[in-house]
Image (cartoon, helix red, strand yellow):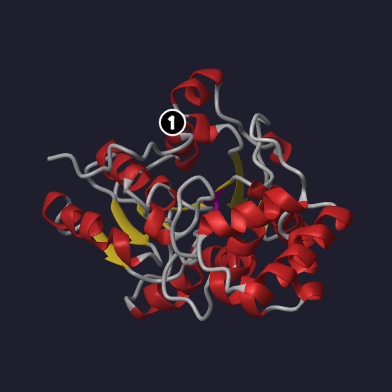
Amino acid sequence: MNIQSNLHKPVLLNEVISALSICDNGIYIDCTFGAGGHSKAILNHNSSVCLYAFDRDESVCDIASSFDSIYKGRYKFYNNKFSDIYNVLRDEGVNSVDGVLFDIGFSSMQIDNPERGFSFMKDGPLLMTMGKNDITAYDVVNYWSKNSLKEIFVLYGDESPRNAEKIAEMIINERKKKKISTTFHLSEIISTALNFKKNKKIHKATLSFQAIRTVVNNELYELEHGITSAMQLLRIGAPLIIISFQGIEDIIIKKKFRELKKNEECYFENKGKPIFPSEDEIFLNPRARSAKLRCIYKK
């Protein structure tokens, strides 16, 4: 039985397994289950390990439940945000674990499904929700002020202030005529605002979609609190591994890791330098090209 989506390839898989240094009877957490690629590799690496997997996305529950019979007694899945891992596992009586993995960002399953509204390449409703959310992309685009939109495009989309101003103004003007309800409609607005030519390599909507998705899912809050929760659970010497894909995430990870090191709560190996995918991996899985793996160890 193939319990992993054929569309999803876990990123930096060999590097993750190496960094975890999986031990006999070890307890591990996969904070971002997705299609189960990393979880499957951890469980298969050593038949004595126990894994707790988390994912806020309800759509992965069927894949997650398929693990139950295969890894019976040493695997459990929770449909929770990863900022909840400490509270959830404390209630389960788990006080110490041997390694924690975060693979943050959105999965192939999410971006490839137009009904989820993540991609400007496929028309769908403006949602961009990873799980149970208070707001959707539709709410942000149609009801947030011009200044708020401009701010998120700069802070979370790495847009220049000038481009952010143009996009925000165009959105405000367009939504006065008609509510912006689809990914194609929003993509057209951004392309027009920035005078995008279709033969360009990187679509102009990339950064704006990234910014909206980050806000809708409160991703940066989740990341900071997820790291704090993980540190509370790690045993001494155990690794915390984070794979990120966008600049703002990596900035927060580096800042948080430096704070932990300064407070003597963790230590680095290899001076804390990131690990990147090999050229072979990028060739086989182009979506891995922007991935970075960072790792710290509980002191």
Q: Which of these two is toward me, 136 or 172?
A: 172
Instruction: Indicate yes or no whether the magenta region holds residue 74.
Output: no
Q: Residue at x 30, y 62 (%)?
A: 59
- Specify start and end residues of the magenta stretch as a single range: 237-242
Q: Position of residue 22 (x, y in %)?
A: 39, 42
Q: Can residue 160 be seen in this view?
A: yes
Q: Where is residue 93 in the image (x, y as percent from the top left)?
A: 34, 76
Q: Is residue 263 visible?
A: no
Residue type, mark 1 in image: Asn
Tell which of 148 and 234 is nearer to you: 148
* Residue 163 image position (x, y, % from top left): 82, 53
Judged from this view, the residue extending furthest toward the right is 162
239 in magenta: yes
- Residue placed most toward the observer, 78 or 185: 185
- Residue in the image at 28% along x and 42% along y: 5
* Mark 1, secondary structure of its residue: helix
Quadrant position of the N terminus in the picture: top left
Q: Which of the 4 quarters of the picture holds residue 125?
A: bottom left
What residue lies at 72% left-to-right and 41% top-to-bottom? 196
Please determine whether, in this image, residue 284 is positioned above or below residue 179: above
Q: Is residue 205 left or right of residue 81?
A: right
Prevailing secondary structure of the magenta residues: strand
| Residue on which the image places disc 1 | 14
